[in-house]
Amino acid sequence: MTSADAWRAGLNPQQLAAVEAPDGPVLVLAAAGTGKTRTLTHRVARLVAEGVPPDRILLVTFTNRAAREMLERARGLAGEAVGGLWGGTFHHLANRLLRRHAPKLGYPSDYLILDTADAKQLMKESMASLGFKPRDFVSPEVIRALVSVAVNSRRPLEDLIGERLADSGADPADVLRVAEVYARRKQELGQMDFDDLLVNGLRLLTEVPAVGEGVAWQFRHVLVDEYQDTNPIQAEMMDRVASRHGNLFVVGDDFQSIYGWRGADFRNILSFPERYPRATVVPLTINYRSVPEVLEVANATMREAVHQFPKTMEAVREAYRRPVRVTLWDGQAQARFVVARLRALLREGYRPHEIAVLYRSHFQALETQMELQKEQMPFLMLSGLRFYEQAHIKDVCALPRLLASPRDDLAFRRLLGLLPRVGAKTADTLWTKVGREFNPGSAVDLERLVKALPAAAREIWAPVHEGLAKHAARGGEPDPGGVIETFLDAFYGGFLQRTYDNAPRRLDDIRELVNQSAAFGSGAEFLHMIALQSNLEDAGDVDGGGGPPPVTLSTIHQAKGLEWKAVIVLWLAEGMFPAARSIAESGDDAEERRLFYVAATRAQDELYLCVPRTRRLRDGGVLPLDPSRFVEELPKDTVDRVESGPWNW
DNA sequence: GTTTCGGTTCTTTTT
DNA sequence: GAACCGAAAC
């Protein structure tokens, strides 16, 4: 085999068929563990080897992690030539287009990206401006989430309000008015939330012919990962980008569609053959990841599912041992079981990073987390909080934000609220006094602020003022990293120590942020990077680094695409998993079922399904739980049953 | 009138 | 851990 053929290496006939599929639309139906990433990266390598310039290839994924992993693996196959390939998330792609063309849609080119917390804050203010109080109205977060679902699923907001807020007592017309104010304020401030990025990215492609045609011309090949999780906007974006050359290569598994709640529509993948009648469809069914016993559980789970491409995973690994269903008294017992089982697995020779504990929702991990801490077992949590949404990161970013966008009252309030004797009210007053605009790079604005500050705050602020004035005197746009450092030295370093017990760790985060900032041309670009950066690469390592990679704790959603030798799934009880709320919202358990399928298929060798029989309530009461339908429905001989206290382990 | 503090309650899932 | 609420402190 020649080196030009390196992309053929190690592919089975199914995978090879996908990699070699001719130009034109291709749908790869890749069941869990069947080599989806391998297929995608080999396809990229093949294209490059056959002379397609890498910068004419677009590879879209849902997470930064997936993008990075694929690019690395493609580079391993095709060499540095892959360097020019553009790979990233849908949001990145949209942001990349908007960075250059936002003014064509009436946005400033240095628009800011609102993360979920910012958006919530803005929604809160929008509500307040109309005189509604969260107390006797709908909470800002609920409205924000509803607006987001409406946008992402392209459904009228009215309908969703009717469905989900029918019993809330709020007047639908009022909710709509709040949503309108929210949209208007974003527009006025030149800010976009995550959904706006997608919507406006698509608008560029459809409404601005020069952009749409240019992009469609540039990308001769478009490859999309996790296609089952695309929402209508994302699917149309890809249709547009691939519209000129027609080479749309999508990979997905309708069984793993778990983002319906945020507007994803797996009908995108189901209807692909109808939308592209000439599409080549390639199934990948040979599973290399898991032992047959694990696959049997996964297959049984999906056998009853309707509205899916029927398929069964074929095992190639040798028989090993059955998954274990462990019945436990309550969450405490479950936590002790987890620790005991982890110890046993480690004794049997598993390495910590080969083991994961998975759960439906973050709070379900709390007891286990505490037990692990108590037992001094290090663990890595793929946490819910994104890097940017941690308080200290948002705090130090307030200044760069104001530099990029002086009318950003959210950033102003955040910054001033850090000072003593300044709370919401005082910050409000100050905002008015400085003329509802504050540019920390302007000497005039700085003076104006100092004069308006209350005495106690002015004293603390003085060193910051001095540092900023120096930046201002230098002229030009101060660089964000420098401003953050000034802020840190003059005030925030001390504030951290006074406020947080883990100040050193937070300080490290900030220093790292400053280091990274050097790589960016403008403050706005720097802020975009932070807002779009997921936290996975900075996940909270609870034992403080150093040692060997520890056991992973993760939600099932965040575990998608990952695999471990041993997997323990928590809280398999009705109401917990499947989650009562999810069933109430969607009307069926289809998505929860797929989620269980995703959980089970993360396991290579060993799978433990924990079934607590009770749940402790805050008032001290004990709530009996029924075992989850997902374990109850499993055919008798697919799992071993253990009635257990930790003493058995 | 505001801010701050201390206690209480509750966590879906994410770019 | 963070968000919320009520009460104390400034």
Image: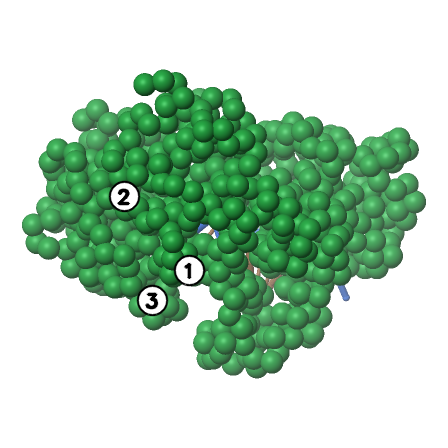
Chain colours: A green, B blue, C brown
Q: Which mark is residue A583?
A: 3
Q: Residue at x 25, y 35 (%)?
A: A13
Residue A300 on image: x %, y %: 17, 54
Q: Which mark is residue A284?
A: 2
As measured in the structure, the alpha-carbon distance from the residue carrying label 1 to the one carrying label 2 is 21 Å
| Same chain? Circles 1 and 2 | yes
What's the amino acid at mark 1? Answer: Arg
What's the amino acid at mark 2? Answer: Leu
Give the quadrant of the N terminus of chain A: top left
Residue A522 on image: x %, y %: 74, 37
**In this view, which residue lies farthest toward the top?**
A2
Crowd around label 1: few <14 · some 14–19 · many ≥20 (10 Å): few
Image depth: mark 2 or mark 3 in front: 2
Give the side of residue A44 with respect to residue A92, left or right: left
Q: Nearer the viewer, residue A537 or A597?
A: A597
As measured in the structure, the alpha-carbon distance from the residue carrying label 1 to the one carrying label 3 is 30 Å
What's the amino acid at mark 3? Answer: Ile
* Label 2: chain letter: A
Q: Residue at x 64, y 29 (%)?
A: A516
